[in-house]
Amino acid sequence: MLLLHGYLSCKESFYYQIKFLSRYFRVTAPDIIGFGASARLEEPYSLDDYCDWLKEFINVSGLEKPHIIAHSFGARLAFKFLSGQKDAADKLVVTGGAGIVKPRSKSYIRRVKAYRRMKKFFPSYAEKHFGSEEYRTLPPVMRESYKKIVNEDLRSFAAAVENKTLLIYGREDKVTPPDCEGKIFNGLIRDSTFALADGGHFCFSENAEAFNKLVYDFLTEN
């Protein structure tokens, strides 16, 4: 069992899953490089770079076809990693999975243009006042990595995932709404099942008992 956490998160976010699933599986939960207690990034990572890191981690850890549970950014990584290589893992559980690049509104495009103009003449001001709160808290290398990650649409990679997949989304998830990301990925991944859980983007922690039951039943069914 391999657990892949979300962006700016860490393995401890899966506390309740590690505690429960360790009764039945050998559980491996790393801090993905750049997050938690792992090594800092020396250069901006794209999803391809993270996939290379994940492949090496799996090999070094001696994991053979692990089940994967992936949250948010972790799901981005899982979709791309498993695309076209089913034998790299067994079953896949995605919760709050991200990876859909939505159409840009006119106001968004205007703001990007304003940011670029401001950055040219007043870079410090631009970095402090433009972009999401999450983006502004990142160091320079992570900012460049973040842009590479969120601007890559993963629909084609999700459609190439052949692993049996369970998609669990929180009913109140505002980050990756179930009617958007969840239903889209469910339609793209051929052998997938969609489920709703009480809670938001961290429904696996907010409603751990019900979430863990869904996961256990899925992983142990034939």
Image (spheres, rainbow, N blue to C red):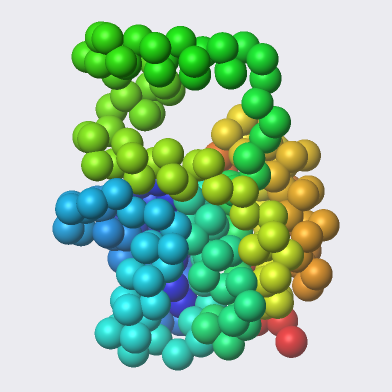
Picture quadrant where residue 122 is located: top left
| Count of numbered labels shown in the rendering | 0
The residue located at (53%, 41%) in the rendering is 151
> Position of 21 compared to 101: left or right?
left
Picture quadrant where residue 48 is located: bottom left
Q: Position of residue 114 (x, y in %)?
A: 46, 10
Given residues 138 and 43, the one toward you in this image is: 43
Does the image show residue 129?
no
Image quadrant occupied by the C terminus:
bottom right
Q: Is residue 97 above or below residue 30?
A: above
Q: Position of residue 130 (x, y in %)?
A: 39, 15
Q: Position of residue 211 (x, y in %)?
A: 60, 56
The residue located at (53%, 56%) in the rendering is 76
Given residues 96 and 204, the one toward you in this image is: 96
Q: Is residue 88 above or below residue 116?
A: below
Picture quadrant where residue 179 is located: top right
Given residues 206 and 68, the one toward you in this image is: 68
> Position of 112 compared to 38: left or right?
right
> Position of 106 compared to 52: left or right?
right
Q: Position of residue 2 (x, y in %)?
A: 44, 72
The residue located at (32%, 60%) in the rendering is 32
Does the image show residue 137?
yes
The residue located at (22%, 14%) in the rendering is 124
Q: Is residue 154 above or below residue 65?
A: above
Given residues 214 and 57, the one toward you in this image is: 57
